[in-house]
Image (spheres, rainbow, N blue to C red):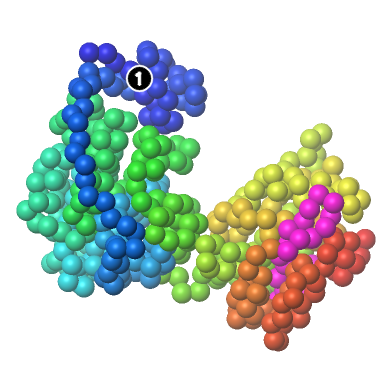
Amino acid sequence: MKSQFICQDCGAVFPKWMGRCSECGNWNSLLEERIEKKKSAPKGTARQVQSISSIEVKEDSRLSSGIGELDRVLGGGIVRGSLILVGGDPGIGKSTLLLQMAHHVAQSGRKVLYVSAEESPLQIKLRAERLKIKGDDIYLLCETSLEQVIATVDAEQPNVLIMDSIQTISTEALSAAPGSVSQVREVTSVLMDLAKNRGIATFIVGHVTKSGTLAGPKVLEHMVDTVLYFEGDGTSIYRILRSVKNRFGSTNEVGLFRMEGMGLIEVDNPSEMFLSSSPSFEPGTVVFPSIEGTRPLLVEIQSLVSQSNFASPRRMALGVDYNKLVLAIAILEKKRNLFLQNQDIYVNAVGGIQINEPALTLPMMVSIASSLLDQPLPKKMIVLGEVGLLGEIRSVPQIEKRLKEAYRLGYERALIPKAEVKVPGMRIDEVSHVDEVFSIFFTT
């Protein structure tokens, strides 16, 4: 029987063992996998086919999780027979979220089976007491064997199955260690067949690597229907649930939570967590209405420009794309003759959110210029727009939705690209070039 070696971090395959993976550069990440001799596949039989129009869509094809933010990220609820992967850093709240969801689903009359391969029943009981969950309708199984889990599913027939976590479940069909690439791939494949054939909505928890990506082969994300990332800083009480893949809804949708002693609490006004609570409006501060999935969020962009003490000035981007920062600096130097070659520039998106949309370019440029010139923008104002290399300001999608959200939160003025958009009660300044922006706000 031959062997091959697979990197746990990037999934690269090598014919022999090496101390360091030549693909991702990580040390001691290669695990041995036995290659079994393939048997000749038997001939299949023809199956009956059907047209798409003949398939009926039932009204109860989705279950409500009882958590509005989770339903939003899933596209309207839990789809029957779907396979959902939830990843995140250790201690971020994955198990807490799924236990709260299991409680709400069980209260609606559905049967939930919670399979834990990492914690004892006592640990889960203590968490449930902290969350004020009685758990009378939640059935718990602490097991690491996939065969035992399948047998329990056959006996209990649950509507929702939670597997915590996929890296600790193993099958007897393979001799590889739990958590290896082959075990994760095989266990996920079996769970996918179980979910599709029996209509069981299945949640699987996945660990992440040091680089922040889901551990295991990349094919794991391709096999599942939905991939959710639970993000957040350990020093902050806020958590962001982000959808990066969803076959049943919008991708890049976000759900916002606040971690408290009673568990995860939904954030009613999501823009409050991304706006500073400081009453003063300092130079370098710009409010930008971002679009995350289908939801507009007001995010505060802060810039700090200071004299550099080094030959090469620093450029630091937190929550924004570094390449967009470099682009904004280059346009300011070329089109507005601002001397930034001896300045350290730091740009931060408040609240820990990651923004990567083109409409951020103009707010970032205005923020940098405001800090450099020490001239604040007017209060209760938002800025959005994409800036080209020639200094032209281009339109961005969903401008009206962004403006209405800003007006609802009390903002009275907006700087936007030229567009036929009007919001009663809001003053709108339309610009087509960066020169017009400086003529309105800054004195150089």
Do we see residue 27 in this rendering? yes
Name the chief secondary structure element in magenta: loop
In this orientation, does residue 91 appear? Answer: no
For this rendering, which residue is in front, 63 or 175?
A: 63
Is 45 a magenta residue?
no
Quadrant assignment, res 355: bottom right
Quadrant of the image containing the C terminus: bottom right
Magenta range is 376-395
| Image coordinates for residue 251, horizontal then vertical, percent | 48, 57
Q: Residues within 10 Å of mark 1 (few under 14, many from 20)?
A: many
> Residue 56 falls in which quadrant of the image?
bottom left
Residue drawn at x 82%, y 68% is: 431
Q: Nearer the viewer, residue 343 or 215?
A: 215
- Left or right placement of residue 353 versus residue 100 in this view: right
From the viewer's side, name the closer residue of 36 and 95.
Answer: 36
The residue at the point 19 percent across, 61 percent down is: 159
Q: Is 86 situated left or right of 275 in this image? A: left
The residue wearing badge 1 is: 5
Q: Is 219 placed left or right of 283 in the picture?
A: left
Q: Residue at x 82, y 34 (%)?
A: 311
